[in-house]
Image (cartoon, grey):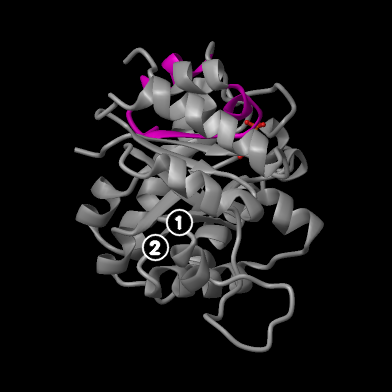
Amino acid sequence: MRKPVIAGNWKLNKTINEAEGLARQLVDKLHHVTRTEIIIAPVFTALPAVARILAGSPLQLAAQNCYPQETGAFTGEISPLLLKDAGCKAIILGHSERRQLLAESDELINRKVHTTLASGLTAILCLGETLEERNSGAMFEVLTRQLKVGLAKLTPAQMTQVIIAYEPVWAIGTGKTASTDQAQEVHSFIRGLVMGLFNQATADNCRILYGGSVKPDNIDALMAEDDIDGALVGGASLKANDFCRIVEYQA
Ligand code: PGA
């Protein structure tokens, strides 16, 4: 069966000191958890310090972005190889904030997925529709394109290192969560797409997380849905108590 994943996306928040403080609290409160994979993604500058705190705990470190080359003349960029060196096990890719604010294309995101997997890290591929796309009936087409291009030229074996995060853009940081029915509908659609692109076993084993205003008071209902295998949590991952309650959701 699919092991649930709860991932905290800290976005552009917290100094090194603050990140260390939060990481210490999480390790303290969550060191006993085995049911769920726990991932946290601080800013780049805090990665090595947080890696030292997570060492020996079940919490895994992730980065929020990377460049699709390992080394070279790419001023200002960071590669999966160097993120692995800093202690990361995973990288969040294609987050809607990057797609919107930095115009990241599906093709660029696909290159990042390949480089990430080649470095032996897990890729957390984000996709999701805007409110306009949902209301105009383009949602399934948009999700299909994001998934198909984002996962282009991957093998079923590589897919074991990929986690998908469905994050409706209209639900991110807005306090509006997709209803459990809306989320389940899209998760099941995405699983069907993965089956079509790869095979049944790949679809059955693929973890699909929901993201968008996940909070202690909505996680239980979301996790009760068949095709929701975890959550990518933004705002609520910055508060130790909230994030711990989300990790310890009531099944
Ligand atoms: P949110 O962010 O939980 O603050 O809505 C989720 C995300 O962007 O990953």
Q: Does the magenta-highlighted stretch encompass residue 7?
A: no
Q: Position of residue 59 (x, y in %)?
A: 38, 38
Q: Report, in whole angstroms, how far the alpha carbon at label 1 lies from the one at label 2.
A: 8 Å
Task: Give the numbered dot on residue 120.
Answer: none
Query: Measured along the vertical axis of the image, is residue 209 above or below residue 93?
Result: above
Figure check: 231 above or below 105: above
Label 2: element kind:
loop
Q: Quadrant of the C terminus?
A: top left
Residue 243: x, y in percent? 51, 23
Q: Which badge, 1 or 2, is on the more N-terminal residue?
A: 1
| Residue tagged 2 | 121
Give the residue at x 70% y 65%.
Answer: 104
The residue positioned 72% from the left and 35% from the top of the image is 170
In this view, 215 is above or below 235? above
Element carrying mark 1: loop
Q: CB under 8 Å between callouts 1 and 2? A: yes
Q: Which mark is residue 88?
A: 1
Q: Nearer the viewer, residue 67 or 231?
A: 67
Quadrant assignment for the N terminus: top left
Residues shaded magenta: 218-239
Tell me if mark 1 has few (under 14), some (14-19) or many (20+) residues whose alpha carbon lies within 10 angstroms of its own.
Answer: many
Q: What is the three-letter code of the residue carrying label 1? A: Cys
Foreground label between 1 and 2: 1
- Residue that sits furthest to the right in the current view: 101
Would residue 236 be counted in the magenta stretch? yes
In this rendered view, identify the residue nearer to me: 77 or 97.
77
